Image: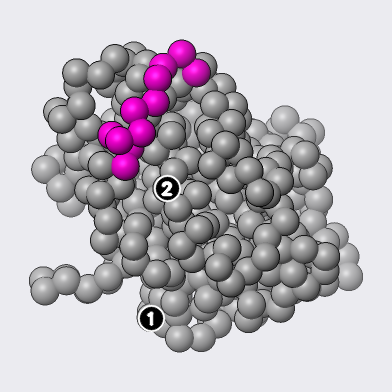
Amino acid sequence: MSKRLAVGLMSGTSVDGVDAALVSIEGAGTDTVVELVHYSTTPFSQPVKKKIFEVMSPDHSSTPLLSSLHFELGDVYADAVEKVCTEAGISVDELSFIGSHGQTVYHQPFHTEDSVASTLQIGEPAVIAYRTSTQVVSNFRSMDMAAGGEGAPLVPYTEFLLYRKKAGGRLLQNIGGIGNVTVLPMDCSLEDVFAFDTGPGNMVIDGLCEKLFGLSFDEDGSIASRGMVHTEAAQEWMNWEQDFFQKAPPKSTGRELFGEVFVNRILQEYGNLGKEDLIATATHFTALTISDAYKRFIFPDHPINEIIIGGGGSYNRTLLRMMRDLLPEVSILIQEDIGYSSDAKEAIAFALLANETLHGNPGNVPGATGAEKTVILGSITPSPTCKK
């Protein structure tokens, strides 16, 4: 088996920028060996960020805006590929493939009276393929939804490949805009793995930071550390979306539940609290939703020794402290504690999923998404020119 170079691209619900992971990858399936060569992030410009939020908003979106942004983000992702390769000192011509998650602008994993379950990630892969002369795997979530799944979370398959262990159960908790957990029981097979969204990750904290302090996030949890937690308020916020929190997995969520409408309701009903107190309470709220999910749906049936935190929330020291206070019976680590990168984790995952697709292997976990069966994920956009 020969090693190949690939780039995984991820931009999440936090809408802060594009993560690019340049990896060396060998093999496929449980024989996969992957090494991170270089990681970089490309922040979205303010105009692009504004357009993304406009497209997400039913009140401000339009077909012309959606179509234009779809192609504009293709160029943003191509820029991210070129950047990570340049910083690593390699030529884009050396890449074998690119896995691009795209930017989620809408995710509705359930049917309603007037609509069917659907998901939409944008960022035209043909633009990326043309700019880099490299084949691109994209649109990962749609096939899982076609198979009756929720299209999320998809990272659990890659976590099974990289993190399973014979001694002790592990939880892989990602805290991006949304929080999601993958459950790896002790000495598990793929059929034993399940995962689900726990609720908001950084989304509510970030939304309040933007409106109250003009900041995109609470760096290191420093604002929250100065505030007082109002536990009754956090519990009431959980009651606002109790249908989600009480629903058994598989389940997924997004900005539709915990975005601007949720943040504005907090400000309307709890605006009398101090600014620092609101950030502290929102941080506790995130920790509470995660611990509540574990105690409802994981701990009763699965002995867990370790929780490994990834994503931007892993750098929020106040959030980690609150999680440890709520979950004193387990060890809580971050990706760096076990030799990985919190920042690069999801971008690496989509390079791995692209590799599985190109090998003709399924990449979803029905126990995580609710799909009827395992399926090969993604759409392949070929390179427009032959690489010799």
Question: Residue 186: horizontal and vertical position, in percent?
Answer: 74, 69
- Judging by the rendered image, the residue that carries numbered circle 2 is 289
Which image quarter: residue 198? Answer: bottom left
- Whether residue 17 appears in magenta in the rendering, the answer is no
Magenta range:
225-235
For the C terminus, which image quadrant? bottom right
Dominant SS in magenta: helix
The residue positioned farthest toward the right in the image shown: 1
Q: Is residue 249 above or below residue 103?
A: below
At 14% across and 40% down in the image, what residue appears? 60
- Judging by the rendered image, the residue that carries numbered circle 1 is 148
Mark 1 vs mark 2, foreground winner is 2
Q: Residues within 10 Å of mark 2 (few under 14, many from 20)?
A: many
Q: Nearer the viewer, residue 281 or 83?
A: 281
Q: CA distance from mark 1 to mark 2?
A: 26 Å
For the N terminus, which image quadrant? bottom right
User: Callout 2, which amino acid?
Assistant: Thr
Question: Residue 226: horizontal and vertical position, in percent?
Answer: 46, 13
At 70% across and 42% down in the image, what residue appears? 333
- In the image, taking residue 207 as reference, residue 21 lies left or right, namely right
At 87% across and 65% down in the image, what residue appears? 2
At 71% across and 63% down in the image, what residue appears? 169
**Can residue 384 be seen here?**
no
